[in-house]
Image (tube, rainbow, N blue to C red):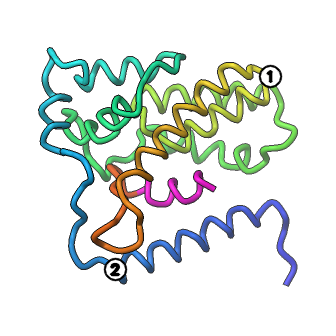
Amino acid sequence: MHINLSIRPILRVVTIAAAVATSLCASAKQPSTPPFDIDRIKAETTDPASAHYYPTLVKRFLEPDTSMTRDDYRYFYYGTMYAEDYNPYRANPFDKEVKALENVYLKREHLTSSERRQIEALAKKCLQDNPLELRQLMYLVYVYESNKKYNLAKIWKSKLDNLLLTIAQSGTGADAEHARIVVYPRHEFDFFNLSG
């Protein structure tokens, strides 16, 4: 069977996703106990006087710098569960726009400057709505690299890597007791796809 080269990455993701879903279903005995204090994360991310107050962390995350620490990322990532509008199954309000750009995302090589501007604008809009849109973070990094804005690409790549590291540090993923803990179900697949 001949497979179009542009489809191979998609098939790889689908294969990995199916394997992960199968293993998660097979090992879903009981929920994992977090290797961090979730009650403390709730208390600090909902306290306006805390350095880890969630709205403050969101603001810091969206700024183009790398001053957030690993603890900041842990509070930011898991603190999202205590945000007023948190819904783990919430759809991206820009899904129609994302779907309209699917062919552009798949193209990846030889993007026009107009296509890069579209991807950048949509990624920024999605991240303003939900800063934990891991795929949009990846697209933003890609566009910055394509536009030779290497410093911005490094900054946003660092943010993406720190979020993936936060997920990785939540468990080994070996079994249900050591499951990785994600705040959005789609992050299970994004984690495996983006962590390489």
Q: Which residue is mark 2?
A: 27
Residue 7 drawn above or below residue 26: above
The amino acid type found where label 1 is placed reads: Lys
- Mark 1, secondary structure of its residue: loop
Q: Residue at x 55, y 44 (%)?
A: 135
Where are the magenta residues, as a range? 186-196
Quadrant housing residue 115: top right
Q: Residue at x 24, y 47 (%)?
A: 36
Q: Which residue is mark 1?
A: 148
Q: Is residue 57 left or right of residue 115?
A: left
Q: Image quadrant for the C terminus? A: bottom right
Classified by dominant secondary structure, the portion drawn in magenta counts as helix
Q: Residue at x 19, y 33 (%)?
A: 84
The amino acid type found where label 2 is placed reads: Ser
Quadrant housing residue 156: top right
Q: Is residue 33 left or right of residue 127?
A: left
Q: Residue at x 33, y 66 (%)?
A: 178
Q: Residues within 10 Å of mark 2 (few under 14, many from 20)?
A: some
Residue situated in front as seen by the camera: 36 or 167: 36
- Percent coordinates x, y for residue 139 in the rendering: 64, 38
Residue situated in front as seen by the camera: 37 or 187: 37
- Percent coordinates x, y for residue 11 in the rendering: 68, 69
Q: Is residue 175 left or right of residue 196?
A: left
- Mark 2, secondary structure of its residue: loop
**How many numbered circles does the render carry?**
2
Q: Image quadrant for the N terminus? A: bottom right
